[in-house]
Image (tube, helix red, strand yellow):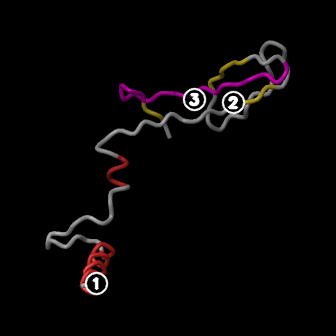
Amino acid sequence: METKTANGRGGGQVPIYEYECLNCNHKFELKQGFDAEPTESCPLCQSLSRRKFHAPAVIYKGSGFYTTDYARRNQPSDNGDSGSDVATSTKETSKETSSKED
């Protein structure tokens, strides 16, 4: 599978990985393919290094992630019903108690 660049041409783009030396704490970056083995040596002291992982940058764009996925479930219907059985039963209970007090 070949990756495409912004201009539509095929490209040999590979990700850039950040490494940190365990001995001298030197931080460096390497361009490596997805299936390449991690580099194990620091370019300064030749000691063992470790690939650092970062949280991906996520940007939500569009009409609204929250409003479409977490909208209110009990919205009034077209026939005038409130859509909530709890509210109806509470009204009936309050009417019964007020008529009993009279």
Is the residue 44 above or below the residue 87 in the image?
above
Split into 4 quadrants, where in the image is the C terminus? bottom left
**Residue beneath disc 1:** 101
Q: Residue furthest left?
A: 79
Is the residue 42 above or below the residue 5 in the image?
above
Q: Distance of mark 1 from mark 2, alpha carbons?
A: 72 Å
Of the pair 80 and 4, the residue shown nearer to us: 80
Residue name at image x 31 percent, y 41 percent? 62
Residue name at image x 22 percent, y 66 percent? 76
The question of residue 22 being in magenta is answered with yes
Is the residue 28 above or below the residue 79 in the image?
above
- What amino acid is found at the position of numbered circle 1 in the picture? Glu
Quadrant in the rendering for residue 26: top right
1 or 2: tag closer to the N-terminus = 2
As drawn, is 55 to the left or to the right of 36? left
- Mark 3 or mark 2, whichever is nearer to me: 2
3 or 1: tag closer to the N-terminus = 3
**Residue beneath disc 2:** 52
Q: Secondary structure at mark 2?
A: strand
Of the pair 41 and 96, the residue shown nearer to us: 96
Measured as percent of width and height from the top left, residue 57 is found at 50, 33
Numbered tag placed on residue 15 in the rendering = 3
Q: Secondary structure at mark 1?
A: helix
Q: Distance of mark 3 from mark 1, alpha carbons?
A: 76 Å
- What amino acid is found at the position of numbered circle 2 in the picture? Lys
Residue name at image x 68 percent, y 34 percent? 36
Q: Residues within 10 Å of mark 3 (few under 14, many from 20)?
A: few
- What amino acid is found at the position of numbered circle 3 in the picture? Pro
- For the magenta stretch, what is the residue range? 5-23
Q: Residues within 10 Å of mark 2 (few under 14, many from 20)?
A: few
As drawn, is 63 to the left or to the right of 42? left
Measured as percent of width and height from the top left, residue 79 is found at 14, 73
